[in-house]
Image (spheres, rainbow, N blue to C red):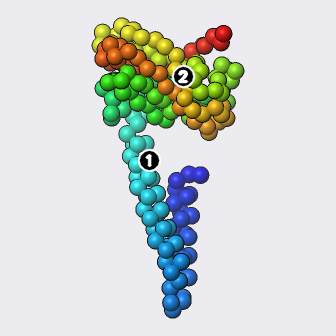
Amino acid sequence: MKPVILFAALLFALILIQSVSRTSDAPDPNVAARLAQLEARTELLTQRLARIEQAAQAVPLTGQPAAATPFTTVGSKDSAVDWRLGVGLQGEPLRVAAQTFDQRRGRVELLLEIKSPLADAAAWPQQPGLEVPVILVARDSSGEVAAEQPMTLMRGPSQEPGAYLHLGTEFSEQIADRARVLELRLGVIERR
């Protein structure tokens, strides 16, 4: 459900409860407690909606179709690296919803949203701990490849559109220190 629709429904419920409580002389303590809960939820939803709008405004619009550029650069506030997303990870069939890189530990994690049916669903495991067909390439400041390895499924065995997949991988400390660009691309994983 979209946040705006949920917000509108909660606001309507809040108005309805207030109008009912105004018509009675003695306010019911249960209604007052529920009203306080609704107000708290409304405030929380308002804050979430503001964060979502800020995040949407922070994403730069390139004006180019995904097929025209092999990689799209994505910024991250908490990361000292540049992220580049290959074709297939820029919205169809997958969209990178979140990415983190803990440079101290060499840990990379992704949250992928499945936007449309996956062409090669058999290549995507449903068990956590198995490799997925998303390849992570770490490049140093000169552009040389420091490491290239597949990501691993951590959570999210569903492959239905609208589902999310949580992926992860780790680099050695030496590679993590050298990494300045992290490229994500769809690849082929051979199952043994």
| Res 95 visible | no
Q: Position of residue 175 (x, y in %)?
A: 35, 13
The quarter of the picture where the C terminus appears is top right
Q: Which mark is residue 97?
A: none
Q: Name the amino acid type tagged 2.
A: Thr
Residue depicted at x 36% and y 27%? 102
Up-down relation of residue 34 to residue 130 (above or below):
below
Q: Position of residue 143 (x, y in %)?
A: 34, 10
Q: Name the amino acid type tagged 1.
A: Ile
Up-down relation of residue 104 to residue 148 (above or below):
below
Marks 2 and 1, the one that precedes in the sequence: 1
Q: Position of residue 129 (x, y in %)?
A: 57, 23
Q: Which mark is residue 152?
A: 2
191 relative to 49 in the view: left or right: right
* Residue 153 quadrant: top right
- Which residue was labeled with disc 1? 52
Residue depicted at x 33% and y 33%? 78
Label 1: how many residues lie within 10 Å, few (<14), some (14-19) or many (20+)?
few
177 relative to 166 in the view: left or right: left
Residue depicted at x 42% and y 34%? 61
- Secondary structure under badge 2? strand
**Residue at the outermost bottom position:** 25
| Res 54 visible | yes
Q: Position of residue 52 (x, y in %)?
A: 44, 47
- What is the count of numbered marks? 2
76 relative to 21 in the view: left or right: left
